[in-house]
Amino acid sequence: MAAFSLEKLLILQDRDSKRLGFEQQLAAVPREVAAVEAKIAAEKAAIESAKAEWHGLESRKKLLELEIKGAEEKAAKYKLQQAQVRKNDEYQALTHEIASTEAAISRLEEEEIGVMLQIDEAKKRFGVAEAELKRNIVGHENRIRTMRDREKQLQADVQTAQAAAAAARNEVPAAQLKVYDRVAARPGHPVCVPVNGGRCGGCHLKVPTHLEVQARAGQEIVTCDQCGRVVYWQS
């Protein structure tokens, strides 16, 4: 039977812990980038929304201009007809149409002035919003670049950590490595824990006396009868 070496198991555990840490950080980068990209998309959508408000008012102004022009042409037509009629009732009817059309023109012009004032305010809001949102976007893009740089470093760190962990595995006898891997496959690191006050340092339950004696001797691999972790005596 291969000699038990607690030191080799603890070295493997330490290197595995570092490897897992780097792998988890690397796996998180795409999610972090996606979250920032979503913020960029939201900022751009906000810019477009502010622009749409302004452009919508511009479109309304153009429609009003067309309505005013059409009403002015109608009023001019009525006035021309009025100058040509001879009957009083026709004259009065055209007078009424002219008055109604000119009143409509007046209302449209008042609405146009109101829309023009809204356009000025919308332009101001858009300018302020665009400048702020673009600054935010630049900040988000800088964060993504930082994340990508970090991702490259993490990729290198993962490779180094994986190589170090593989080297440590080669130092652990196969039978002991099988026990280590069985425990490591379960959620909850570390695999190797000390016996503290007669209790397992992992699950914190009482360790039977004979297992504590074996752990104290340090001659063989000892596992907790409750959680399966490798337990060792820490003087």
Image: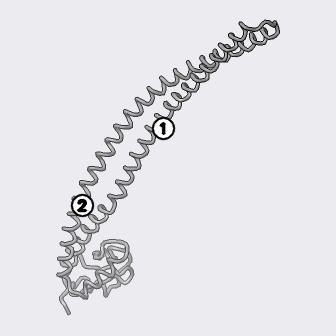
User: Tag 2's secondary structure?
Assistant: helix
Nearest to the observer: residue 120 or residue 43? 120
| Above-or-below relation of 56 to 206 | above
Give, as a three-letter code, the residue at label 1: Ser
Q: Quadrant of the C terminus?
A: bottom left
- Which labelled disc corresponds to residue 49? 1
Q: Quadrant of residue 208?
A: bottom left
Count of marks overlaid on the render: 2
Image position, residue 21 (x, y; %): 28, 65
Q: Residue furthest bottom?
A: 1
Q: Quadrant of residue 184?
A: bottom left
Nearest to the observer: residue 190 or residue 144? 144
Give neighbour class at mark 2: few <14, some 14-19, many 20+ (Cα, 10 Å): many
| Above-or-below relation of 113 to 32 | above
**C-alpha distance separating marks 1 and 2:** 38 Å
Q: Which residue does the numbered mark 2 point to in the structure image? A: 154
Left or right placement of residue 134 versus residue 233 in this view: right
Tell me whether circle 1 and circle 2 mark residues in contact (CB < 8 Å): no
Q: Quadrant of residue 132?
A: top left
Q: What residue is shown at x 53% (from left), y 32% (from top)?
A: 56
User: Tag 1's secondary structure?
Assistant: helix
